[in-house]
Every structure is written in structure tokens, then in C-alpha cells.
Image: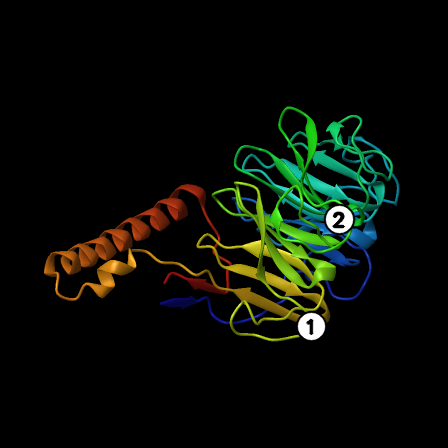
């Protein structure tokens, strides 16, 4: 079963390249790279070419949250400076984390309007304490439920982790290349976007490998889709991508990918089994079939009530174009 939310594409803000705050109809952006949404529906944009973090409110007003001219400066948001910020993520309390790419830093924008550096300083590579850590063009950022940040360190070909106790470590990758398997031995090739599922599984748009990669919670890297450069839909094993850059995941595990050089938005549906296959095959066992029927009924009841609870308690704005429930 599928829900289609109107099926219309519209422009929320922006038109020609430039910079202008105010009403969304008059606002201007310059290479907006990434976007995230708060629980109240406010949009936050990494306006890379303008070196700013912008905000689009529910009443259709665009304003600058932080940044102005290119540079680096922590402190009050009005005085802060960024350099080509590319990726952004948000916590439930509204704290923003930014991959400040050309400054080789991970920055934090608190809800009380203070910008600070979480990790990184100059270009390089170094794990350890956040104060000493080094990044090389961090491109993607996501956050887990426990507050751990995960960053795609583009020119270091690594997936990095920033723990809540201030330690930076490498999750996967080392030198440029391609290799699945144990995270310690795995290789990436300019990893771009990153997203995380509710169970902590990481998904990475491995840009120059033309693949979507998965890092499981037990430290195994595998290829979800893609192989050689190209374009092909169908089975994930046969699919092809062409420099995929952005990736996000829906609540049910569906992946959405910006397949950059193919100029397409791609969808990777999860392979989900809700019950043991033996129940389907045991045609002569009536009790098994009744159990299967009851299981499905319970699943749907729980699913519907959970969805209603989330909508009523968190004011969710459902924006996924094609929400697959089955």
C-alpha cells in the first residue's frame, strides 16, 4: 500500500542565484547544499555559496541563523563566519551541527545563539581528542539517538565518529579504494552523504565508487546498491549509479539518493520480511496460518496507533513523497 501526498512539486524559496532574506517569494540562495527539518517543521539550509546557515519558518520567512562573509569565527551567531558549509543536521532540542567543509571543522549552533567548534581545525587527519582532531573537507553529517555524530571525511576517504565524551575515531575506511568486509579493512572513495537508521546502521553515498554502502552496528561494511559507473534501475545487485552524493532514510528503511551525475533522485526499497517464511510454506498447518493472520492484524494496529501518536505529540509534517507502508 502506498500514500501519495498530492504528487506536486513546488518551490518553497529562492529563484536566481544571490542572497536575500525575507519573504520566501523574494528570497535568494547561492548553491544551497543540504537541508534538515526540526520537529516543528522549520527548515534549516546549508547555503554553501553564501557561507551561511539559513532558516525557513513555517510562516514562510527566510532568515540567516549564522554566518555572513567567508571566513572562520566562533561566538555569537551574528558575528560567526563559515566557509562553504555543505551538510547540516539537527537534534530534537533544536541544536544544529554543521560540516563546515572548507574550514575542515564540525561546528555547533546552540539554541541560545552561540556557534562553537566541535572538532577539527586545519586540513589533515588525526583521531583522538576533539581539540586535536583533524579533518579534510568533511562533507556529510548525521546524528544518532544518543548524540553521537558521524561524519564523512571526504578527502580522507573515511567515516569518522565524534562521541559525546569528545573523542574522534575512525569508523571505517583508510586509503582511497573499494573494499567491503570488516570496517577496519574497508575502503571508500570520496564518501559524500551519510544517514543513520533508527537501529544505528549507517548508510553512505560512496561518491567515486558509485555505490551505496552500509555499515552495520557490528562493524561490517557491505554494498547495498551500485557497482560500476552508469544508470540502471531494478535489482540492487544489478543497479548502477553515477557519483551519488546525498542520501536520507525514511522511518520504514527506504533509502532516497541524489544520483548527482545521472540528474536523478533514486529510491532503494528495503527487503523486509515481517514473519518467518516457514509459516507461508506450511499450507496444511491451520494454526500457523491463524497465527500469521493475527500477527499481521496486530502489526497494522500497532503501526496505525504509533503513527497517530507521533503526529499528535510531535506535530510532524509528513513530507516524504512516497511513504511505503508495505
Dot 2 crowding, Cα within 10 Å, few <14, some 14–19, many 20+: many
Crowd class of label 1 (few under 14; some 14 to 19; many from 20; radius 10 Å): some
Residue 197 point in image, percent of width and height: 51, 47
Question: Coloring scheme of the render?
Answer: rainbow
The circle drawn on residue 318 is none
Residue at point 54% right, 67% down?
236
Which SS class for mark 2? Answer: loop
Image vertical order of residue 24 relative to residue 231, above or below: above
From where the camera sits, is residue 22 visible? no
Would residue 63 appear left or right of 309 to someone viewing this image? right
Q: Quadrant of residue 148?
A: top right
Instruction: Give the left or right position of residue 278, taking residue 287 as reference.
Output: right
Judge by depth and name the residue closer to the eye, 53 or 184: 184
Q: What residue is shown at x 80% (from left), y 58% (from top)?
A: 30
Residue 108 to residue 305: above or below:
above
Q: Is residue 188 visible?
A: yes
Quadrant of residue 211 within the rendered picture: bottom right
Residue for badge 1 = 262
Residue placed under numbered mark 2 in the picture: 157
Across and down, in percent, residue 267 comes to: 54, 66
Check contact, mark 1 vs mark 2: CB within 8 A: no
Residue 130: % across, % down: 74, 28
**SS at badge 1:** helix
Q: In the image, what residue occupies the spot 39% across and 67% down?
A: 2
Where is residue 123 drawn, in percent x and y?
86, 40
Amino acid at each position: 500500500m502506498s500514500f501519495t501526498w498530492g504528487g506536486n512539486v513546488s518551490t518553497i524559496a529562492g529563484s536566481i542565484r544571490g542572497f536575500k532574506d525575507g519573504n520566501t517569494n523574494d528570497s535568494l540562495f547561492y548553491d544551497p547544499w543540504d537541508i534538515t527539518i526540526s520537529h516543528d517543521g522549520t527548515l534549516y539550509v546549508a547555503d554553501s555559496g553564501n557561507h551561511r546557515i539559513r532558516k525557513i519558518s513555517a510562516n514562510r520567512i527566510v532568515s540567516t541563523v549564522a554566518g555572513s562573509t567567508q571566513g572562520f569565527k566562533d561566538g555569537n551567531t551574528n558575528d560567526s563566519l563559515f566557509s562553504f558549509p555543505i551538510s547540516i543536521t539537527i537534534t530534537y532540542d533544536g541544536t544544529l551541527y554543521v560540516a563546515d567543509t572548507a574550514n575542515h571543522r564540525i561546528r555547533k549552533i546552540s539554541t541560545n545563539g552561540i556557534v562553537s567548534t566541535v572538532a577539527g581545525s586545519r586540513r589533515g587527519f588525526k583521531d583522538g581528542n576533539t581539540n586535536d582532531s583533524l579533518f579534510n573537507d568533511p562533507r556529510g553529517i548525521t546524528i544518532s539517538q544518543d548524540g553521537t555524530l558521524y561524519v564523512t571525511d571526504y578527502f580522507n576517504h573515511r567515516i569518522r565518529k565524534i562521541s559525546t565524551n569528545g573523542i574522534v575515531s575512525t569508523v571505517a575506511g583508510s586509503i582511497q579504494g573499494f573494499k567491503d568486509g570488516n570496517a577496519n579493512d574497508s575502503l571508500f572513495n570520496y564518501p559524500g552523504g551519510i544517514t543513520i537508521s533508527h537501529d544505528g546502521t549507517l548508510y553512505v553515498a560512496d561518491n567515486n565508487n558509485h555505490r551505496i554502502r552500509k555499515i552495520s552496528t557490528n562493524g561490517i561494511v557491505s554494498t547495498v546498491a551500485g557497482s560500476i559507473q552508469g544508470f540502471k534501475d531494478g535489482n540492487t545487485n544489478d543497479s548502477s549509479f553515477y557519483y551519488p552524493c546525498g542520501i536520507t532514510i525514511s522511518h520504514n528503511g527506504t533509502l532516497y539518493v541524489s544520483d548527482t551525475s545521472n540528474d536523478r533522485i533514486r529510491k532503494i526499497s528495503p527487503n523486509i520480511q515481517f514473519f518467518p517464511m516457514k509459516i507461508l510454506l506450511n499450507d496444511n498447518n491451520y494454526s500457523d496460518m491463524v497465527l500469521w493472520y493475527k500477527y499481521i492484524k496486530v502489526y497494522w494496529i500497532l503501526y496505525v496507533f504509533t503513527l497517530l501518536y507521533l503526529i499528535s505529540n510531535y506535530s510532524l509534517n509528513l513530507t516524504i513523497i512516497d511513504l511505503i507502508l508495505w
